[in-house]
Amino acid sequence: MKQTLIKACVLVLMVFSVSKLIEPSPAPTPQVQNIQPQWYKKPEVVIIKVPVRETKIIKEDMTPQVVIVDNSDMVYEDIDVFCLAKNIFHEAGIEPDIGKYAVAQVTLNRVASRKYPNTICKVVLDRYQFSWANNRSRHWTRPNGPNWDRSYEIARQVMNEGHRVKGLENSRYYHADYVKPHWSRKMTHVATVGRHVFYTNDAIY
């Protein structure tokens, strides 16, 4: 009996030893090797700051101002200067010179438009256009005083020397700044000169 027990224990030990011998060994952990050569050096990122010169944006000055243009092809008579001076005097006689030139500019713009008569006197005396001209008794009277003298001089400069108002080239309408006529709602505001507000109905780009 004792010998049989010993044989059984020996058999168990032998089976255990054999199982250990045939048990697969764990797979080796792969090792990542650095394949870069020893002389390899990682490049450095170099940031170069390039100085940028600041530039100023130059905007065209559209403020109405008096300029001189080539006026050599204009044909006119003394009566045209008189009618233009009358309109300047009655519409802007107490205004600064720029206001007087502005009224003259609108008058010439109307002469050039197909919507209005083709002479200065006809434009100035056109019915219901300039309020002073609605009184016929004032059409051909000649005023006097410094305001008239300056109005006449500006009319002469406009017709003879080519004085124009840059910024009002397309303006054919204006009104005093203390009124708000219904037609102004359909117009494009161009500028305010003195006590007058100027408009155009042309497309502005």
Image: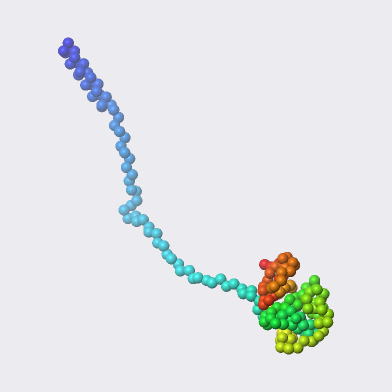
- Image check: 17 left or right of 182? left
In terms of image quadrants, where is residue 153?
bottom right
Q: Which residue is at a point 73% across and 76% down the rendered structure image?
A: 106
- Image check: 32 left or right of 88? left
Give above or below for 182 relative to 84.
above
Give the residue at the far top of this rendering: 1
Nearest the camera: 76 or 15? 76
The spot of residue 114 in percent (x, y) is 80, 72
The spot of residue 169 in percent (x, y) is 71, 74
The spot of residue 85 in percent (x, y) is 76, 83
Nearest the camera: 203 or 15? 203
Give the residue at the far right of this rendering: 136
Nearest the camera: 52 or 76? 76
Nearest the camera: 169 or 136? 136
Give the residue at the far front of this rendering: 178
- Image check: 139 left or right of 8? right
Residue 179 in view, yes or no: yes
Q: Which residue is at a point 54% across and 72% down the rendered structure image?
A: 56
On-image quarter of the N terminus: top left
Q: Which residue is at a point 68% across and 76% down the rendered structure image?
A: 195
Residue 70 in view, yes or no: no
Q: Which residue is at a point 19% across and 13% down the rendered structure image?
A: 4
| Count of labels in the image | 0
Give above or below for 132 relative to 36.
below
The spot of residue 11 in percent (x, y) is 22, 18
